[in-house]
Image (tube, helix red, strand yellow):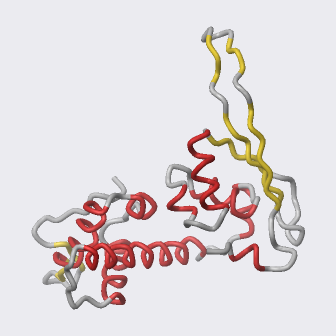
């Protein structure tokens, strides 16, 4: 699972990490917990100053699984914001991200996330010995349609959800997707996915 940006000559960011030791906090009269600082220098082709992301020891262990190409960063660090994950991946500050990324980048990222969510859902169904004749493309289309037109889904949270919650939302959308008399997409029977933006 090599990171795409690292495959481009001159585009690989430089990542270093430093463990910050426990220090005495006079205000709380106790030791502050140790933490990691991950510094990421943007690619030479982009330039700019290095950014720093602060991680707890537990987050750092999960960060290493992504760094070592074992899992996607969305799975390793779902508790970080998309901007912070981008900082770890490319070294781009939030301000730089806004100026460099095209307006449709977010939409493209959502499409990729939905594909991963559907792939995971189909894997779960296969694992529990249910092999419904479902089209992967159909499920992707259905989840995308609901996300864009009915309920905004919390895609990062849904991807990191446990198997039961993920199947509840994906298959719930599949089983309840309908069109009303006005031709508008709806989820019938008052079904609401668990991972929606409130």
Q: Nearer the viewer, residue 157 or 162?
A: 162
The x, y position of residue 165, in whole percent, is 27, 60
User: Left or right of 158: which side holds 20?
Assistant: right
The x, y position of residue 38, in whole percent, is 74, 47
The x, y position of residue 158, in whole percent, is 38, 62
User: Left or right of 191: which side holds 126?
Assistant: right
The vertical placement of 64 against 172, above or below, is above
Q: Residue at x 33, y 58 (%)?
A: 162
Q: Quadrant of residue 192?
A: bottom left
User: Left or right of 73: which side holds 2?
Assistant: right
The x, y position of residue 111, in whole percent, is 48, 78
Q: Residue at x 61, y 61 (%)?
A: 66
Q: Residue at x 64, y 22 (%)?
A: 32
Q: Nearer the viewer, residue 107 or 172?
A: 172
Q: Quadrant of residue 40?
A: bottom right
Q: Residue at x 82, y 60 (%)?
A: 14
Q: Nearer the viewer, residue 32 or 177?
A: 32
The vertical placement of 55 against 70, above or below, is above
The vertical placement of 34 against 195, above or below, is above
């Amino acid at each position: 699972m090599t990171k795409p940006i690292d495959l481009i000559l001159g585009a690989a960011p430089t990542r270093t990490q430093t463990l910050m030791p426990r220090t005495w906090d006079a205000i709380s009269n106790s030791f502050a917990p140790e933490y990691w600082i991950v510094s990421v220098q943007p690619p030479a082709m982009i330039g700019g100053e290095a950014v720093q992301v602060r991680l707890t020891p537990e987050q750092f262990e999960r960060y290493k699984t992504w760094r070592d190409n074992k899992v996607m960063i969305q799975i390793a660090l779902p508790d970080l914001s998309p901007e912070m994950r981008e900082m770890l991946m490319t070294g781009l500050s939030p301000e730089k991200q806004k100026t460099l990324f095209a307006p449709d980048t977010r939409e493209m990222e959502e499409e990729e996330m939905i594909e991963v969510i559907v792939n995971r859902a189909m894997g779960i169904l296969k694992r529990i010995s249910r092999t419904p004749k479902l089209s992967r493309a159909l499920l992707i289309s259905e989840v995308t349609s609901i996300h864009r037109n009915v309920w905004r889904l919390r895609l990062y949270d849904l991807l990191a959800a446990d198997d039961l919650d993920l199947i509840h939302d994906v298959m719930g959308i599949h089983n309840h997707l309908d069109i009303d008399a006005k031709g508008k997409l709806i989820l019938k029977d008052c079904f609401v996915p668990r991972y929606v933006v409130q």
